[in-house]
Amino acid sequence: MLLHDVMVFSKQCSHTKELAIDASSVTFVFALLDVGRSCILVSIGSKCVMLDCGMHMGYNDNRRFPDFSFITESGRLSEHIDCVIISHFHLDHCGSLPYFSEMVGYDGPIYMTHPTKAICPVLLEDYRRISVDKKGDTNFFTSQMIKACMKKVITVNLHQTIQVDDELQIKAYYAGHVLGAAMFLITVGMQSFVYTGDYNMTPDRHLGAASIDKCRPDLLITESTYATTIRDSKRCRERDFLKKLLECVEKGGKVLIPVFALGRAQELCILLETLWDRMNLKVPIYFTQGLAEKANHYYKLFISWTNQKIKSTFAENNMFEFKHIKAFDKSLTSQPGPMVVFATPGMLHAGQSLNLFKNWAEDEKNMLIMPGYCVAGTIGHKVLSGMKKIEIEKKLINVRLSVQYMSFSAHADAKGIMQLIRQAEPKNVMLVHGEAEKMEFLKQKIVKEFGIDCFMPANGETATITTQSDIPVKVSDRLLKRALEEYSGFLPAKKALIKPSHYPVEGVLVVRDKGVEVIDRCEAESQLGLVPHEIKFSCIINPDVRSTELHQLPDKLQSVVEKLLPDHSVMRLSEYSIGIDYSTVLIEIPEPSSTKLRISWDFKHNQLGESVYSKLQMNISRLL
């Protein structure tokens, strides 16, 4: 199963002009806790985004596809998903795309980079041909479905912000890894997250290192394939690789290097081409027929995605035109003598690489070099696990050849993952595309070093993430002017005002399409056509006053009020009424012959009204 639920964030916002409000909650729903396939569903606000749509290379039945019933068990998925983003062309990230869009049913936009759109259908068709035409698999997409699926694709340039709709936008960043691979920043309103896909923080012979802005997302969803690995230097790995390879061919053995068509294949081809040139070696090197030519075409077409050295020398010296590497023909399989063969696919789960392995596995002189990760369930994974007897297509194969694992993987190691976290400065991290035990180790390291929460949900699990985000709130000039007038007690003219560090401002919060604004009550009444309602409070006090002194009561009352409220303005409004602070609180003698006092105020000045009432009730009889 592939789709997990992760609840994410209730937010508090802050402000332009010193105001804060509560924002809505956001929910993230996604997947996954293995390396076999990537398919992550993220729900943020009212939007839902699918990140990658990969196939599990270790299965040959319906388990190879994600379980889309997690999204809905009936109806087309277009009603539930706003867009799909594909990070790169590897089948564990895009292999289920035609199945998802054409067989399950999705008509919405699919975003990927230009190189990914160019290469993706070629690899999909190649895998369909192996699975359907050669193996006879059923319930698989057709060539026509691949074409129909790719018509829904919208291409994205690096650092280009794409506005998917009024609220949802995406932005691509360079990820290294393979030609066209990208990380994506997804933003909905003031909330955002980054999805890395697969990435590499170390530059190599043909691609640059991944990089991202200090975008400070609410969540970073990062791959963790090599969560506990810190690789040695590239130079040491290359030296070890060449040494073992030369030892094998010098003894007359054959070297099989399973690779995917683009990516590590070009990296290792450049390495061998350089060595063969320098040492003038004659041992033949082969590449699966057709793929070398296709790869060369794509690297010419998308030269801007390679590293600086390749770009600067491309016009004079095309690094992808190999003199020593020839197309492989099936007739060469049983040819005696040493040779080096790059064969696809990279996990020995099908195709030419599996065919050559079956033919060469029982000869001790031969060597298998695995340069990258192998998913559980594939023949490559079984070989690397040390199995000496493997059943392939109902035939038992004795593994006698030398098996070497030399990681030339273009995934970030533990050091690289930590480096990306420092670059992006996320508020939370989520680990996906990895093995649970290794992810747990890295999780503890992230929490300790960065002091932020780190999550690694299992398939179908829900996690809740709480975070904070700023929401700018505009405050009207009229509201600020009124607030200053009330605070200062007079109309501001040329006289300087004392600026308070904190002062409560009362207004009406209005949410519009263009943003959030706090406006004056009168503005709200005018704009919204509202009739104001006023709440007033009134209290009666019966002071102990002799009837012979009733004629002196108004004057004595004013004197008492001035004494009790020295910090407030007290004004005689009429013979029988007194106003406090410009009549915000009114003290009246309702009837000339009465000893009763009526104190009234409105809801807005409730604090002052209650204070005046309390002081008069406690002291009026004594002071009169």
Image (spheres, rainbow, N blue to C red):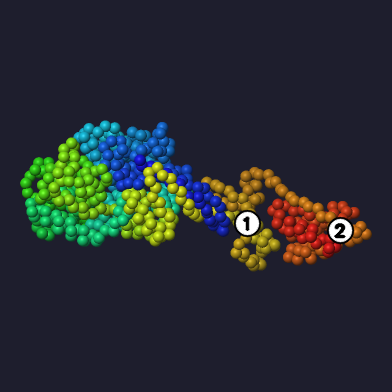
Between 451 and 313, which is closer to the camera in this rendering?
A: 451
- Distance of label 1 from label 2 (alpha carbons): 40 Å
**On the rendered structure, is 500 left or right of 244?**
right
Residue at image point 52% right, 53% down: 12
In the rendered structure, which amino acid carries the disc numbered 1?
Val
Residue at image point 12% right, 45% down: 362
Badge 1: residue crowd in 10 Å (few <14, some 14–19, many ≥20): some
Viewport quadrant of the C terminus: bottom right
Viewport quadrant of the N terminus: top left
Residue 60 circle label: none
**On the rendered structure, is 224 left or right of 281?**
right
Query: Which mark is nearer the camera, 1 or 2?
Result: 2
In the rendered structure, which amino acid carries the disc numbered 2?
Asp
Q: Name the residue at the right extreme.
A: 548
Residue at image point 57% right, 58% down: 18
* Place of residue 49 in the rendered image (x, y in percent of width and height, measured from the top left): 40, 44
Badge 2: residue crowd in 10 Å (few <14, some 14–19, many ≥20): few
Which sits earlier in the primary sequence, circle 1 or circle 2?
1
Residue 505 circle label: 1
Residue 544 circle label: 2
Number of marks present in the image shown = 2
Residue at image point 15% right, 46% down: 399
